Image (cartoon, rainbow, N blue to C red):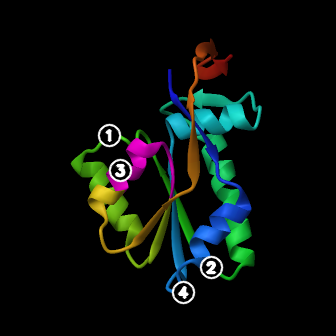
Amino acid sequence: MPIYTEPLSDEILLSNLKHSDETKEILILGCAACANISCNIYHGKNEPAMNVLMKPFSIEREIRRIKSILDKNNYLVDSCTITGLCTSSERKRKNIIKNANGKDTIIVMSCPGGLATVKSVINDKKIISGMKVKGFKSVKFKLKGTKIYIQE
């Protein structure tokens, strides 16, 4: 049962960014676990939800969509995804720090646990959530070949 989150509206996200004149370079940091599953459900896609050998299609598509909007608003944007952003490890902390280097704002596309992890690692940048919690989602996973799909 993953935490179900949905992306913030474009208007709210842009409003949250405009509260600071210092925001020029942004990192969009996505979670390849619950947030990926949530985006899969939110967009009604029948794509692999989890597979260690495949990219997290749904969250990466959402990140590309947001990146496009931010590019049009003259922000410099980079992105990355990390699996299980809510769990902390030395490797994840180093990955977050490396990707946040040179950025002044981080948009976290995850549940509150992932947001808390990022806030515990980065304390000199503006950090905003790019998703809102809508509750928990009871899902079943089904196998198709070597891929794991969501079945509601």
Q: Which residues are magenta?
A: 108-118
Label 4 – label 1 distance at C-alpha: 32 Å
Q: Amino acid at mark 4?
A: Asp
First reached walking from the N terminus: tag 4 or tag 1: 4
Q: Residue at x 51, y 41 (%)?
A: 32
Residue 68 within the magenta-colored segment of the rendering: no
Q: Please name which of the two marks, 4 or 1, marks the residue nearer to the observer.
A: 4
Q: Classify residue 10 as left or right of residue 25.
A: right
Relative vertical location of residue 90 with respect to residue 16 in this rendering, above or below: above
Q: Which residue is mark 1?
A: 87
Mark 4 surroundings: few (<14), some (14-19) or many (≥20) residues within 10 A: few
> In terms of image quadrants, where is residue 46?
top right
Q: Secondary structure at mark 2?
A: loop
Relative vertical location of residue 117 with respect to residue 151 in this rendering, above or below: below
First reached walking from the N terminus: tag 2 or tag 3: 2
Q: Which residue is mark 2?
A: 75
Q: Which residue is mark 3?
A: 116
First reached walking from the N terminus: tag 4 or tag 3: 4
Label 1 – label 2 distance at C-alpha: 29 Å
Relative vertical location of residue 50 with respect to residue 70 in this rendering, above or below: above
Residue contact at pointers 3 and 1, CB within 8 angstroms:
no
Q: Main secondary structure of the magenta part?
A: helix
Q: Secondary structure at mark 3?
A: helix
Label 2 – label 3 distance at C-alpha: 24 Å
